[in-house]
Amino acid sequence: MKKSAQVLVIGAGPVGTVAAYKLAESGIDVMLVEANPDCPEDLRASTLHPPTLEMLEAMGIFQEIDAMGLRAPVYQYRDRKSGETFEFDLGELSDLTPFPFRMQCEQFKLSRLLAGRLAAHPRAQVRFGEHVVSMEQDDDGVTVNVETQGGEAAYRVEYVIGCDGAGSVARKQIGIGFGGFTYPEKFVTYSTTAPLESYLPGLAQVNYVADPDEWMVLLRVPSVWRVLVPAPDADDQSLVSDARTSDVFERLTGDGSIRTEHRTIYNVHQRVAEQYFRGRVILAGDAAHLNNPLGGFGMNSGIHDAWNLCEKLTSVLLANAEAPALLAQYERQRRSVMLSFVQEQTIRNKRQLENKDPEARKAYVNDLRAILLDDERRRAYLKGQSMITSYGQERAIA
């Protein structure tokens, strides 16, 4: 069979489009395959951390993302019961990064920007509406079988990158386990154009609100405020009903009449693939790991996967580097950071926001006070929460 491309990327979300574009820009023939007719308009992920922004700058797209997004240098932790607010400013890290802020920009905007660039790229093919159903690999490459609107097709490539999400076909095809757990409660996100900052004076653009009864996250993106809350044990229809929505905003603002643009329910997981590759099929993003959204680490971690992996595949395909050794290093670097930082930190973040133990809540608040008063601890904390530390740790792993 004639080779269709050097690398086939499954999934046109932010991770898949970053991977495909980085490879194409490096001079590698790439095919991007997506089952949907366009990049999925997923509203869940919206935060881009400083190391990720540096990657987007290196790809020449930061200015476009900046124009579509919202810079958020300051974020807050709020205690809903006491009314205390603890404010952290990423501007303190301006000596470490040219982007000392979080960029709030819905993930589909990044995906569609890159998909458009790929469609015009001489090294890229973009195929929407094609669903990968199976693949077979041998010593020389991988045959990928897809269903298209016109029937079945097969592509022959040297490597496959599975960026196809939690239900990854790529991961299932190569038989890699996905250990971890699913939280018993669901999460609900409400999007509203109401000016929440008018109801909550001093509100930052990113806010984590601790409350043993109903913790929440308040995030500003250019078009709306997004309010994330845990969902009680109820049917989905009740969770997004007008009555429950009114109750949430009544408790938050005192105004239960606030209207919403979107109401989304989703299950939340903490899972990591047992391996990140098998043979010539490699996993990245949600296909390799899942975590709760508290901290905004999920999409960023996936983009960091793509960046790391594509650097290594470029060496393999253009400089004849040894693939097994480099892919094993990719797995060590990215999986280690996922386990030691992202999984632990996101679980801890959720526990701190929802904790019902008065003594534990008091200790958490006291610790935040101490961090803010200690220059060295505050700097280390900001480096950790902005993913600067974890990105450096990844690069230090041989």
Image (spheres, helix red, strand yellow):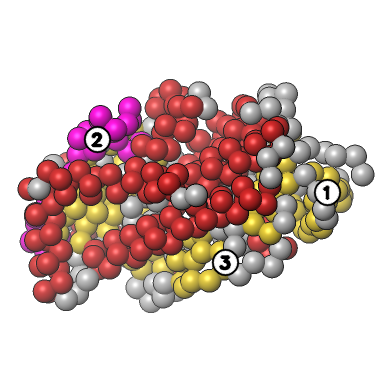
Tally the marks: 3
Q: Nearer the N terminus, badge 3 or badge 2?
A: 2
Q: Name the residue under label 3.
A: 274
From which residue to which does the magenta span run?
A: 80-104
Residue 208 position, x and y percent, is 24, 54
Name the amino acid type tagged 1.
Asp
Name the amino acid type tagged 3.
Glu
Residue 350 position, x and y percent, is 30, 64
Query: Residue at position x 38%, y 44% from top?
Result: 392
Res. 392 in view: yes
Circle 3 — which element? loop
CA–CA distance in space, label 3 to label 1: 24 Å
Residue 297 position, x and y percent, is 40, 51
Q: Mark 1 points at which residue?
A: 140
CB-based contact (under 8 Å), mark 3 and mark 1: no
Q: Name the residue under label 2.
A: 93
CA–CA distance in space, label 3 to label 2: 35 Å
